[in-house]
Image (cartoon, rainbow, N blue to C red):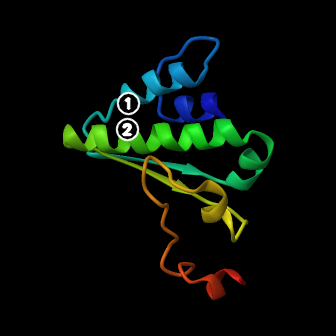
Amino acid sequence: MLFAIVDSLKIPRFPKINLDGFNDFISDVDFGSHKGVVVALLGFERLLSSSGAVATNVLDILASHHRSHLLMGNRFLTIVQTDDPRMDEKLGLVGGYQPAWNPGECMNRDRGL
């Protein structure tokens, strides 16, 4: 998954990557003439169930760089798609903040709970 994110952002990389390297790569996102980049993570419940610590660390790294890129005038947004209606409870805080559901799913009843 780390390679998929780094490659989609067209960041040059090494043959191997760990979370520290991923953190460094995300700090080097080249926005070019664009003012924003969106990272969409689909089916996130699968990664969380198979590699919970990696999944939460990846989200923390992306959230941290969201703020650091804003300081430079760039927008770095991460959208996480999940089929788990309790994902917010399982994740807890991400980057020090509670993740927000989209407006159509923000109420528990909207997620079938």
Q: In this view, does 107 lie above or below 55?
A: below
Residue beneath label 1, please?
Answer: 29
Q: Residue furthest bottom?
A: 109
The quarter of the rendered structure image containing the N terminus is top right
Give amino acid for label 1: Val
Q: Which numbered mark, 1 or 2, is in the foreground of this view?
A: 2
Residue beneath label 2, please?
Answer: 65
Residue at (72, 48) in percent of width and height: 48
Mark 1 vs 2: CB contact within 8 A: yes
Horizontal and vertical percent position of residue 112: 72, 84
Residue at (56, 38) in percent of width and height: 58
In depth, the one of 66 and 5 nearer the eye is 66
Horizontal and vertical percent position of residue 104: 54, 81
For label 2, count other residues whose C-alpha is less than 10 Å away and answer few (under 14), some (14-19) or many (20+).
many
Does 78 sit left or right of 90 as displayed? left
Residue at (51, 56) in percent of width and height: 79
Q: Earlier in the sequence, mark 1 or mark 2?
A: 1
Horizontal and vertical percent position of residue 60: 49, 42
Circle on res. 42: none
Q: In this view, does 11 lie above or below 87?
A: above
Give amino acid for label 2: His
- Mark 2 falls on what kind of element? helix
Q: Distance between the residues labelled 1 and 2?
A: 10 Å
Q: Quadrant of residue 2?
A: top right
